[in-house]
Amino acid sequence: MKKVSVFTYLVLLLIALVTPFKTFAGWPIGKYRDLVIPSFSYYTQTDHFDAKGNQIKGAPGTGFTSFSMSLYIGYGISRRLDFIATVPFLYTMNRLAPGNTITNQGAGDMVAGLSYNLVNFNYVRFLSVQVSGIVPLYSNTNGSSALGFGDFGSEVKLMFSGNLPASIFDKGYFNAELAYRRYYSSQGPDQVSFLGTIGYPVTKHSQVSLDLLLFRSYSSDKAYNPNFFAERDFAFFKPSLNFGHTFTRRFSLFAGGYYVPIGLNTGVGYGGSVLAVFKI
Amino acid sequence: MKKISCLTFIALTILFASTLKAVALQQKEEEAEETGDVTLRAIPQGKDAIFKRNENILYKLQLQNKTNDSQVGEISYLITTDEGQKVSLDSVHIAMRGNSKKELLIKIPQKKTGFYRLNFMIKLPEYDDTVRKVFGVDPDKIQSQLHRPADFEAFWKQSREQLEKVAPKYKVIERRDLSTEEKRVYSVEMQSYENFLIRGWLVVPTDGKKFPVHYRVPGYVVGLKPNMDSDDFIAFDINVRGNGDSKDVINVGTDNYCLINVENKDKYIYRGVYMDCIRGLDFLCSHPDLGIDTSKIYVEGGSQGGALAVITAGLDSRVKVLTMQVPLYADIHDNMSISASYKSQVFPFKVFRKYNSMHPGFTWDKFFSTFDYYDPQNFAPMVKCPVLMGIGLLDQFCPPRCSMALFNHIGSTNKEFVCVANSTHEVNFNYFMFQNLWLREKFRIP
């Protein structure tokens, strides 16, 4: 009979050690619970990669900068099924030449859908699938917009998340996401991305994480556009380093920076982001 | 382009390999350690070995011949009821080459509601073994008779009135020697039923102002220590009389504890024990200043602790959530019938039968005339809060049928149970992981 109590201790200890900070990746949100994540990000570029991956120096006074704010909302409908939605608001500055800057602002592409936990591996690792629809929240005049493609789309994403194997790290988590997105237009694009994340707590309330994003967008429209919200055919590899701090059980803050060292037909960009996680 | 393709390929390989490894690890964890020249694994169709009345019982048998010699023989499978009565016996012929594996699918016709013992007996020229399993059929439909005395409620009302007359005289002593930067540990003392001094351990996380409470009640003569493992709950572990550091008056071993005054319902040990659990609740509810969220108290226990937990939740609505594992003494009448079929007796009837044999005047009627006031099943209809129960299907101390009978009498409709197919008197890691998520769901803990 003692076994039960001792086992409880051991398990609760383990739970305390392994519960991940970053619950908004492939982990189920949890029935009846909500996640609200406002975020702000900054991106800028002056140089770009050509279609062969060569780095091309930008002309003096030219470049592209964007500021974006977005609101992510997640709601746990059941233990396995979550509703998620993201609404971005963009402000872009496309510097075509010294003194010639085009600015645009407005809501971007809303992504809304459902995430379903296919398998849980002993409640330690989770394999989930997410299916979303993409709805442009801006008008698309003449078939183009600086805020996006202006087309409806859909995305399917497979996510595998959980605690790092104890044989490698005594704590920490990982998240891997493989996504396919398609915009319903004759020029697409079709986009495939892979995001790998490893997070490691450095103190009880703080963590660092490394994101590695591989992104490929395919389209018959091969033209280079410094505004990546409107560009169709490109690829890049983007590592980012983040720092997160949990202030309370309901509030955490993450900040990070990134750089694009490898790309095709895209900007040599860098920037940063700040996001707040509210668990309600 | 080459670089990106290469990175993509590496990333996908890692993702695929990780998924496969996770699946393999899960399978490995589920496999019992097997030794011997020939091994037999019996895997139910559903992981929890629970079936519906209108479906066949399916088991996959995995055989491995680790010898160099061919093996020819048979596997027979015997199904008996909880009372050990034969339901069916069947067999299949097997022939295996040396160093080979084989899988068989065993299909057993539909069965009535209940639990069944299923023994797979492998018989080869040089090797015999029996693999024991239990499966359940619609356990949520198991019905049992409540043997509730007519004055049951009056008896417990009177017990509570007597408890209320005892001034608690709480003492809360901070134990800096046991505290850490993250947890403050308090030793708690209080006077309980019949003026017994009982003690407990309160552990308060320093990282917050108000917390829900994990109130743990002890297993059979098990001393509870400060529970330092939860960051999201205040942990209160009570040592009821005769347990842990509450042995000032009663200090007996496991063979005698449940027999103290068993012939007198008014003086039986568990009357005070049950009231100790209520006194622990009194303590929690009178100390919100320690950060206790008195609206979020969950009571938990395993074995005797499971029984104490259901009784505490039944007697007192201040308990908002109940979780229990393998509740001891549940449906004590049926437990006696089932245990009669065991080849060798186990607790609790090992102790009760021994006492009965040594005390000729102590009839079973007399035993039940006391124990019917204490059978946790009789408290189950009074439980109105959300409930989670975990049981082990191979448990002989608390037979699954008895635990499910109790569960089905619980007055709350917000209740769930988890069957662990290969566990005896315990549950497994998965159960506790699920319990943790379940509690977070019930209390909306982020």
Image (tube, coloured by chain):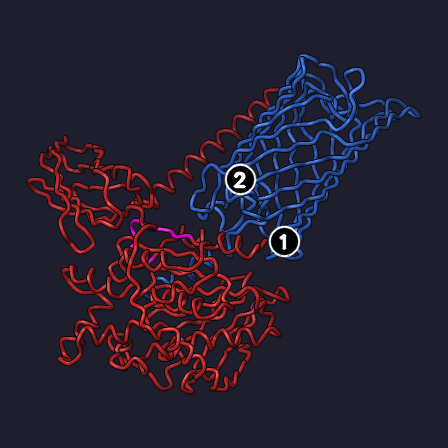
**Numbered circle sitting on residue A206:** 1
Where residue A145 appears, as percent x and y from the top left, is: 78, 22
Q: Can residue A262 be seen in this view?
A: yes
Q: Which quadrant holds residue A114?
A: top right
Magenta-colored span:
B416-426
The residue that mark 2 highlights is A81
* Magenta run includes residue A167: no
The amino acid type found where label 1 is placed reads Ser
Secondary structure category for the residue under label 2: strand
Secondary structure category for the residue under label 1: strand
Chain A shown in which color? blue
Q: Is residue A55 visible?
A: no
Reading the chain from its start, which is encountered first: label 2 or label 1? 2
Q: Which quadrant holds residue B126?
A: top left
Mark 1, residues whose alpha carbon is within 10 Å: few (<14), some, or many (≥20)? some
Where residue A138 appears, as percent x and y from the top left, is: 77, 27
